[in-house]
Amino acid sequence: MRYGGEGRTRFLLIILIVTSLFLITLDLHGVTLLENARQGTQTVLSPFQRAGNVVLSPFKNFLSDVTHLGRTRNQIEKLRADNAKLKATLLNRKNADAQLKQLKSILDLAGTAGYKVVNARVISQGSSQLFSQSIIIDSGANAGIKKNMTVLSQNGIAGVVKDVYPNTSLVMLATDPSFKIGVRIAGTQQIGILTGRGSSSGALQLLDNQTTVKVGDVLLARGSVANRPFVPGVPVGYVTFVDNSAGEIAQSGSVRYYTSFSGLGVVAVVVGAPVTNPGDALVPPKPIPTPIPTVTVYVTPSPSPTK
Amino acid sequence: MLTRQISLSAPIFLFIYLFQEAAMNQFKLPGGGFSLFVIFALVWAILSTPEIAALTGFAAGIMMDMAQNSDGPVGQWTLIMILVCYGVSYLGYGDGNISGNPIGVIFFVVSANLASELLFIASGALLGVTVGSFGQVLITLLGNSLWTLVVAPIVLPVFSFLHNFVFETRSA
């Protein structure tokens, strides 16, 4: 021990540890004072998070482009072809346009199913230091959002509202390890449970050993009692891998989410469920394969060999 | 003296916390990213006496627990940060090879950061906090450590200067 280690320091350490254990106990017993303190902190932080989101949007876009370089190569090549003035204009408008596109898609999705939604912008991506997969959106209780409401992206399920504050909400993403959703295979009544894995894919566990699932099957949200936390019919993802191990009671597999969680800019919270179940109405259309041109070369052999 | 130190330290802690929540959390960095606030708290603890380090850990932990996206119960990060901050200061205080040497400080910061993550997982398992699959946890731990290793040397001079300014003592 290099430090003197006086009794006072040890006494202080014990007091601090006991205090923290006391706080944990209080929180586990659901003392509202601590919840109110967290809410108060978020109320204070939300204006700064909004400001940070506005100021840092260009940097976020740049970083996103760098990390998705392979996927955005075509877009980069297109931008290179533009002149400097158009480039500058495009860069300034890029964020707003992307959010508008996302918003339009979300409204199309919600409109098809008859969901009543509240749109919101993502103002914070959360911290991976905490191992949770969450985002903070700029709409809260004042906009009619409540806990355990479904959150949509432009392509399907994004997550579920975990906590609500006056002007912001915490959304647990579908990738969070503690996220679970009852799903149905589109076109059938086969059901299973999808669990987040902290990545862009989830783990599917079918509930019935008489049913089968195959790669490419589309999964939709089965819906919950009173439509909370999940409204029915929301596209969740498609099956990418099926485990047919003999020892398994029912089939399991991997599912790729439709939502791109790294690029979430705008989301919609379902505040009103449809009167009737939309069924398979929201199943995304299969991509139309681009025809590959075939070139046929005819070669006629010469009468005599050339030297 | 202590009043002066606390009154100077508090706005610095608040500023770094605000910067972490408002700016750093806007970015989804590959491999789990890093927490500037944790790096700051650890540097502050390493350069301080164990007594101050324990208080630093308590304050930093409370602030982390108050973050909206904090998954565990209030007090979990507080407990972890008290133990880690006190631990690094206890081991390094008075040893010029560690707290007086930037490489020693960075080594301690990275190790302590990893220790805090491991303690979070361990305590989370007891408290029912889900942290994901083994592979994902491994990626986060590795990525977080690498990011900390990259960022800590860049911010160390600034944090060290601030600590020196508040405590008017040695710096790394």
Image (cartoon, rainbow, N blue to C red):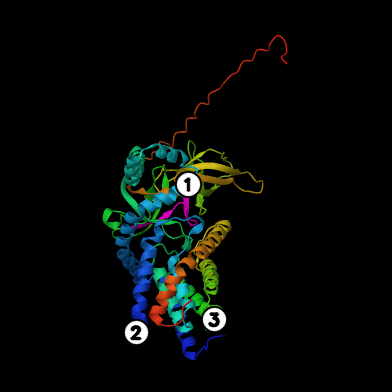
Query: In the image as oriented, which residue stretches furthest toward the top?
Result: A303
The image position of residue A41, as x and y in percent, is 33, 67
- Residue in the picture at 40% in, 82% down: B167
Q: Are marks 2 and 1 in contact (CB under 8 Å)?
A: no
Q: Nearer the viewer, residue B24 or A36?
A: B24
Using the rendered image of the protein, determine whether residue A114 is visible from the camera's viewpoint.
Answer: no
Is A74 within the magenta?
Answer: no
The answer, for residue A200, to whether it is visible in the render is yes
Residue matched to label 2: B3
Badge 3 crowding class, 10 Å Cα cut-off, few under 14, some 14 to 19, many 20 or more, is: few
Report the residue marked by disc 1. A68
Q: Which mark is residue B96?
A: 3
* Type of amino acid under label 3: Gly
Q: Is residue A275 left or right of residue B153?
A: left
Q: Amino acid at mark 2?
A: Thr
> Magenta span covers which residues?
A168-181
Q: Is residue A138 or residue B152 the one in the foreground?
A: B152
Q: Position of residue A205 (x, y in %)?
A: 55, 48
**Mark 2 → mark 1, Cα distance in angstroms:** 49 Å
Residue A11 appears left or right of A31: right
> What separation in Å lies between label 1 and label 3 (alpha carbons)?
44 Å
Mark 1–mark 3 CB contact (< 8 Å) = no
